[in-house]
Image (cartoon, rainbow, N blue to C red):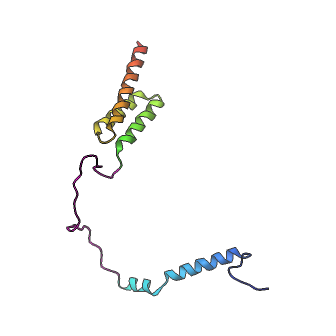
Amino acid sequence: MRFCVFDARFPPLSGVFFVCALLAGCAAPQSRALRSAPPPPLPGAVELDQSPFFPQEEFQLADMAPDPVPALNNLALTLDAQGRLAQALEVARRAVTLGGLFAAQSRNTLATLVEKAKDSDDRNR
């Protein structure tokens, strides 16, 4: 009977062989050289003089960071669905105050919540 490390009947043995080969690659001579003489530290900040600057034009995104307005708008809708109308109004007002690309949807949400609050006040009277 022949014995092979990669034989299908011995999958754990082939896995152990693979892990050993992988770990042996980490103990290469270049890692010892790096430990004995580490490279110089990188600078904390670099000014890029050679990179071009393109100012924003109309219909371009001002930044690529996520806009907090949709998250606040969704939070206001969730609070309203949970029956916490006063908190929903406060969050919706904050979303409208922030402005940004999605402020129109937040204004619609705020108008809907204000109308709902007026209706609930009229029913309570």
What residue range appears in magenta? Answer: 38-65
Q: Is residue 34 left or right of residue 45?
A: right
Q: Would you place residue 35 above or below residue 81 in this image?
A: below
Percent from the top left, x then y, of residue 12?
Answer: 68, 74
x 38%, y 85%: residue:
36
Residue farthest along the left direction in this orientation: 49
Hey, which quadrant is residue 118 in on the image?
top left
Residue shown at 45% from the left, 35% from the top: 78
**Which quadrant of the rendered structure holds the N terminus?**
bottom right
At 69% across and 74% down in the image, what residue appears? Answer: 11
Q: Nearest the camera: 118 or 103?
A: 103
**Residue 12 forms part of the magenta stretch:** no
Residue placed furthest toward the right = 1
Q: Residue, x 35% and y 44% (percent of image)?
A: 68
The image shows residue 7 at horizontal and vertical percentages of 71, 79
In magenta stretch: residue 42: yes
Q: Is residue 59 above or below residue 54?
A: above
